[in-house]
């Protein structure tokens, strides 16, 4: 758990009044294509040429949608002492507004398929179609809509790097702090001095078919009112069976360090209590590819998050 010394936000009753605003319709096919484009570029493993090329593409795509883009570059140290280049892509919409919401996902892919059923694949990289690219695909589609019709508030979208380079299973010991290196860096080196957002929403592994989103432990600890807001919106839109209003497990993810950075944040992440890992069946395997991307899940997440930000005043 993050040792930032933060305290949980106070639980509040969600506003039950339906706010009538013009929320764009989320295009799940477009989000799917954004995922496919990332996967087609190759493995987004930090330190590779594909990794650097993908960072440039993400920044250019956000700029194309009208964002003011900052690429936060640094070198971070992996679990094994390896020095890795890091590129956090930060897209600012209406940067002049102080009333802001932060959306995030990680864009890198894992260098090890350490949960693959075939041991010969354990040192092979993964496509990361769901684990990484799915959240980015949703946020790129949200950015496309913001570029056409802006919400009332300012929106920052951060695509965090080097989230998935944590120590593989064959390394003994507790290595929880070897994950989410990009968001750890951002928490201590914000892109703007004194940066503040009202709240943050992280998307991670949002597109596997048939799974649900539960109230993740740290999200519920730091920002229960944001969980309430998002889950109430999902139920109102007809996605209540996908956003289940009951507790899930505790997950070390980028949202933990977003909270450390002073932004009360939640994680929308798929959990599977029937899996040994607690995640989708293809997690950290070579089978995390486009075959397991579900457009309904993209719609449920994308339309819910987009409605939340467009209803803000």
Image (cartoon, helix red, strand yellow):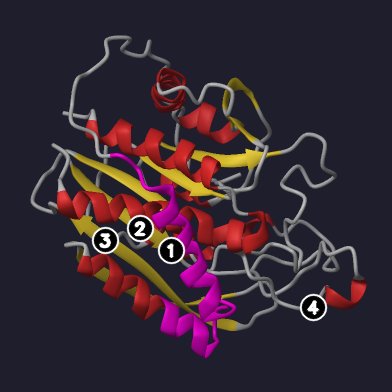
As measured in the structure, the alpha-carbon distance from the residue carrying label 4 to the one carrying label 2 is: 30 Å
Left or right: 85 in relation to 213: left
Task: Indicate yes or no whether the magenta region holds residue 131.
Answer: no
- The residue under label 2 is 140
As measured in the structure, the alpha-carbon distance from the residue carrying label 3 to the one carrying label 2 is: 10 Å
SS of the residue under disc 2:
helix
Magenta-highlighted stretch: main secondary structure? helix
Specify which label sits upstream in the sequence, 1 or 4: 1
SS of the residue under disc 1:
helix
Specify which label sits upstream in the sequence, 3 or 4: 3
Marks 3 and 2 in Cβ contact (< 8 Å): no
- The residue under label 3 is 91
Q: Residue at x 30, y 39 (%)?
A: 25
- The residue under label 1 is 34
Q: Which quadrant would residue 307 be assigned to in this image?
A: top left
Specify which label sits upstream in the sequence, 3 or 2: 3
SS of the residue under disc 3:
strand
Q: Is residue 105 visible?
A: no
Q: Residue at x 36, y 14 (%)?
A: 14
Could you tell me residue 283's position as x and y percent? Answer: 72, 56
Could you tell me residue 13's position as x and y percent? Answer: 38, 10
- The residue under label 4 is 123
As measured in the structure, the alpha-carbon distance from the residue carrying label 1 to the one carrying label 3 is: 16 Å
Q: Residue at x 15, y 46 (%)?
A: 149
Marks 2 and 1 in Cβ contact (< 8 Å): yes
Q: Nearer the viewer, mark 2 or mark 1?
A: 1
Q: What span is in magenta?
A: 25-54
Marks 1 and 4 in Cβ contact (< 8 Å): no
As measured in the structure, the alpha-carbon distance from the residue carrying label 3 to the one carrying label 4 is: 33 Å
SS of the residue under disc 4:
loop
């Amino acid at each position: 758990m993050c040792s930032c010394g933060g305290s949980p936000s106070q639980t509040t009753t969600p506003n039950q009044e339906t706010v009538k605003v013009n929320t764009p319709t989320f295009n799940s096919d477009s989000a799917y294509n954004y995922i496919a484009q990332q996967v087609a570029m190759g493995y987004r493993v930090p330190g590779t040429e594909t990794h650097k090329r993908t960072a440039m593409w993400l920044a250019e795509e956000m700029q194309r949608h009208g964002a003011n883009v900052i690429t936060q570059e640094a070198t971070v140290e992996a679990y094994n002492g390896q020095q890795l280049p890091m590129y956090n892509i930060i897209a600012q919409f209406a940067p002049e507004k102080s009333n802001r919401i932060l959306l995030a996902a990680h864009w890198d892919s894992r260098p090890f398929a350490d949960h693959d059923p075939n041991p010969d694949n354990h040192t092979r990289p993964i496509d990361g179609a769901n684990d990484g690219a799915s959240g980015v695909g949703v946020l790129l589609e949200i950015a496309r809509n913001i570029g056409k019709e802006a919400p009332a508030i300012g929106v920052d979208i951060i695509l965090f790097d080097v989230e998935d380079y944590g120590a593989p299973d064959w390394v003994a010991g507790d290595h929880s702090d070897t994950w989410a290196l990009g968001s750890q860096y951002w928490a201590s080196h914000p892109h703007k001095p004194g940066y503040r957002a009202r709240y943050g929403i992280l998307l991670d592994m949002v597109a596997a078919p048939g799974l649900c989103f539960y109230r993740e432990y740290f999200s519920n600890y730091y920002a229960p009112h944001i969980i309430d807001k998002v889950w109430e919106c999902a139920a109102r839109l007809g996605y209540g069976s996908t956003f289940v209003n009951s507790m899930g497990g505790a997950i070390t993810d980028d949202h933990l360090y977003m909270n450390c950075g002073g932004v009360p944040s939640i994680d929308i992440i798929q959990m599977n209590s029937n899996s040994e890992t607690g995640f989708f069946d293809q997690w950290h395997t070579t089978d995390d590819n486009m075959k397991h991307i579900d457009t309904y899940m993209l719609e449920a997440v994308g339309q819910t998050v987009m409605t939340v930000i467009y209803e803000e005043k």
